[in-house]
Amino acid sequence: MKKSLKIVIPILLILGAGGFLLTAFASGNGKEHETFRVRRDRISGSIEESGDIEGETDYTYYAQVSAPVSMMGLKVGDVVNKGDKLLTYDVTDYERTVSQASISRQQSEDNAKGQIEQSDKNQSRYNKAVADDQAYSVLYYLERESANSQNEAQYSENWNIQCERDSISKEIAKKQGEVGGKEAELATTEDPERAQTLSKEISDLNKQIGDLQSGYYSLAPAQLSPEEYANLNDTNNVMEDITRNWTQSKTQKNAYEATILNASQKEALNKQTELAQSKEDAAMEDLSKASMGVVADFQGVVTECNVKEGSVVAKGTPLFKIVGTEDMKVTVMISKYDIGSVKKGQRAEVSIAGKVYPATVSRINHVATEDDSDKAKVAVDVHIDEPDEDLILGLEADVTIYTDELMGVLVIPYGALYSDDGGDYCYVISDGVIAKQYVTAGVSTNEYAEIKEGLKEDDIVITDAVTDDLIGDKASEAVH
């Protein structure tokens, strides 16, 4: 805001006890005025607002475990430092859980180890039984071949004998039939000569039958000889042993095979052990968290506290909230008229209780909100560069944001700049007299104003109170 026209009140100086009234009169060079020589300097526009001091970092601590709270002495407003122990838990139940999980894991490992070791032993026994099965199979085949060979030779011999016996028996039966026929004929014949012939033929046939019978009974019996019987008996004994051992090896093979763990079963045992280990690890992790309690991650102030000492909290319960004091800010609301001049990274100042802190614009919200007067404004965060212990969260602070910072521009004191219907102007001393000089002003602060047109370097601008009535009066720069 530019200043309106100033009104000058004459200064009366009352000097001495006699009460002489002295009025300042101009000397030969005119009245002396406080002045400023126009120069080039740095200047920036500024926006002034106020807002509450806040911490840039805030964190709500949640219970990492379910347990009774054994120590918690925080209150809202307490200051905490990084590394401070804020809360401790009663870890008795977690120690018991870890012990039980450790025993369960050891039992699972022992069980898996025992079953796998027994399976490996049975695998070796199974392999031996399989090898024995194959070996006895070969031996049985060889002995079976030998026995079959013996039986075939004996069978062939017995067959031949039997065939010869059958042949003699048939021949005897045939001749006995002939004898019977001739005897019948002899009994009925009346011819002596025929009877004599028949008698002789019957006698010859009986002799032949006797010779055949002698040959029949002289044949070797259809049975094994003592040597053959001994060989066959040895073979049968060996076959019996082979069969017994072979059967035993097959039984053992089947029995051991049923007790051998396959890959899936071993994997299942390993998974059970891993699960037990995982449960133990989880229990130990919970114990570690419970033993650690809650430690402050940064310096700050407690703004919320939701638990008390002795209470039992569930995992995920909000415990307390801490707002950091190492990084602090002030959030100010900027109107639509000024927000276009605000940029992230601009220099700013935060003033509170007469103390000024350097600051920087750190964030500009891209969503406008309505203030108490229902006017849309934009929240701008101003980071306090060097906070100290004097800053208190929640207190209101004045913020100045410096915008459009310019270097090497013509400046005059802001108090020397006036405005009327004709525009901006100032009073200058030109050729020893007071003159009114209209100017084009630019960026201004509480201290200086930029002059774009109307003045040049080293022009003399009057900074004390002047009115248009003094235009044309002689004047000079005050000497100090």
Image (tube, rainbow, N blue to C red):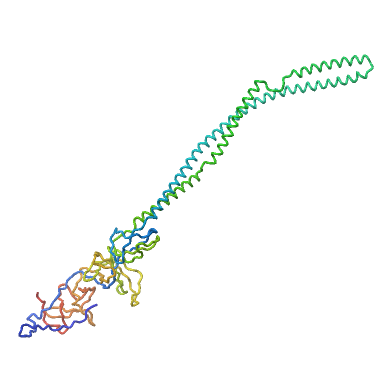
| Residue in the picture at 7% in, 81% down | 27
Q: Pick the quarter of the image with the N terminus.
A: bottom left
361 lies above or below 169:
below
Provide residue 355's location: percent of width, then percent of height.
21, 69
Work out whether 183 lies above or below 422: above
Tally of numbered discs: 0
Question: Is residue 294 depicted above or below 182 in this figure?
Answer: below
- Left/right placement of residue 256 relative to residue 343 reads right
Q: Nearer the viewer, residue 292 or 450?
A: 292
Drawn side of residue 438 relative to residue 74, left or right: left
Residue extending farthest right: 190
- Residue 430 is situated, as x and y percent measured from the top left of the image, at 13, 78
Residue 476: horizontal and vertical position, in percent?
A: 10, 78
Residue 267 placement (x, y as % from top left):
48, 46
Q: Residue at x 50, y 45 (%)?
A: 265
* Residue 449, quarter of the rendered image: bottom left
The answer to whether residue 52 is left or right of residue 257 is: left
The quarter of the rendered structure image containing the C terminus is: bottom left
